[in-house]
Amino acid sequence: MKHFARRLKIQDNINTDYVISGRYKFKIQDPKELSKYIFEDLDPGFAARVKGGDILVAGENFGCGSSREQAPQALKMSGFAAVIAKSFARIFYRNAFNIGLLLLECNTDFIDDGDQLEIDIEKNKVRSVSKGLLLDINPIPPVMKTLLDDGGVIEHFKKHGGFKFEG
Amino acid sequence: MGKTIAEKILSNHSGKDLRAGDVAVCDVDFCFGQDGTSSIIIDSFKKLGAAKAFDKSKFYMIIDHSAPSPNIGVSAIHKKMRDFAGTYQVGMYDIGCGVCHQLVPQKGHVTCGDLVLGADSHTCTYGAINVFSTGVGSTDLAITLASGKNWFKVPETMKIVVSGKLPKGVYSKDIILHIAKDVGANGATYRAVEFYGDAISALSVDGRFTISNMAVEIGAKIGIMEADAKVIKWVGEHSRKEPKPVKADLDAKYVSVKKYDVSKLVPQVARPHTVDNVADVTDLADVKIDQAFVGTCTNGRLEDLEAAAAILKGRTVHPGVKFIVAPASQEIYLAAMKRGLVETFVKSGCIVVAPGCGPCVGTHNGVLADGEAAISTANRNFKGRMGNPNSFIYLASPATVAASALTGRISDPRTHKGRL
């Protein structure tokens, strides 16, 4: 599948308030409706430019701050196929895999907005078609891979009657 | 080899001998959600198909982020929470009771050695009373609500030692802002932090909550302290649960050790729009402010209100400043009334609002206008945090906030000698 990179003006420490502001998340329960307002405080109009299959690209500590699960939910509902960043904050990291949003850790310095990307999770590589670059991804931890393969933590828990990596 | 506090508490709750890096399923002693996260907890709990809560006494929902409700959408969420609490017979603290991170320890739900999950990032607050408590998302919380368990990766631990006698007018908030400046917003990501030192021991338990509360602002999973005599006394006064204090072994392995001497620390202020963008108060004297706010899970406790009131007493807030005060709980509100602090605030021109998060999360009770600046005792100054992306938020101690409210500019509380 063809993916295109979407980058914001700021790169590091993009917090979950920026992903979805408290102005919306406290009063809107529908994730599709919420997804219209992602990054509104940083870049009004950003949400409207996202196309299905796009990949959000950022720097260090993406998703820091609030524990709001509305943040990964809204990104997923916007159509993002994955988020690629140099590093993620821990609550966001769990939340994203719990709901089946793919996160990948990779040096993102050489990815620009609009670049065409290909992902190979099995080989842990991101290819920038636009730049002719092949970038290494940090392997997805086994627990997260299990959750992802099962379609999220709820499906995982129901399927196995608990955590599969238990005992 | 010895163990850290995190390794010991997670081992105790999994029945396994765990070390940093291990993954294990642990029993959770208490869990909760607030009104920004409970709607998804309820949805996820229903998707799990669970018939009931794992233990009705170990889960609460707290309405604090928008309390009382400012609009129809929030009212619908509050009603959904009340309906769920009624149907599943689980506990709830409704509007006005206070901020979750004050209520959970104050009402005695947690004690030393416990493992606690909250659907709120500042759940790390109870590290101050030797609790392994950390924030998770709503679906993770729903899993725990249904099963009493969750999975944990045992974090590596960073040791922070704070020593020296704090000067007058300098508080625990200044210590943690100073640490945030040094290590940065990403400095402890995924790590546990253990806090030590005579400067920490000298603080009241309330003062220590402020430090543990902001551990997440440097990325930490927990910000934990040992249980000394003050902590044991505090939990004894608030909880009927038996404390199980956990200490680190002398030969525990730390990923890094940081040392700070705070004997010459000056009041600290975090500038827009990140918590680690910290300066000395003396460097910001030109900054005009339009609003002041004392409250939140960071600094809405009785000693915080006392520090602010002492500076305000018999004086009037600058005419250009809106000064909002939100006690962190009803009990604190009542205690503040009995001590005359509420009268001091009102006579000084402050607006005392219902216990809750309100202005800090920008839902109601003090949304800023375009171009306005606020000085607040909260823990986050992200762009738009107080409801308007075109405004500016400075973070400081209650004393610095009160001193600034009197002048309309960021001001040094140390000039109010005799009131500190």
Image (spheres, rainbow, N blue to C red):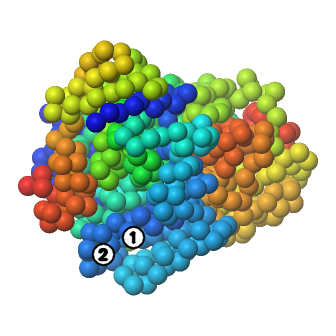
Q: The residue marked by circle 1 belongs to what chain? A: B
Front residue of B390 and B341: B390
Disc 2: which residue: B53
Q: Which amino acid is tagged 1? A: Ile
Q: The residue marked by circle 2 belongs to what chain? A: B
Quick check: B34 left or right of B309?
left
- The residue drawn where x is 74% and y is 55% is B366
Expressed as whole percent of the image width and height from the top left, the position of residue B137 reads 38, 55
> Farthest residue toward the front?
A2
- The residue drawn where x is 45% and y is 51% is A74
The answer to whether marks 1 and 2 mark residues whose Cβ atoms lie closer than 8 Å is: no
Quick check: B387 left or right of A55?
right
Expressed as whole percent of the image width and height from the top left, the position of residue B147 reads 23, 68
Q: Is residue B226 visible?
A: no
Quadrant containing the C terminus of chain B in the rendered view? top right
- The residue drawn where x is 44% and y is 41% is A51
> Farthest residue toward the left?
A167
Q: SS at mark 2?
A: loop
Decide which of tag 1 and tag 2 comes sooner along the chain.
Answer: 1
Q: Which amino acid is tagged 2? A: Ala
Disc 1: which residue: B42
- The residue drawn where x is 73% and y is 68% is B337
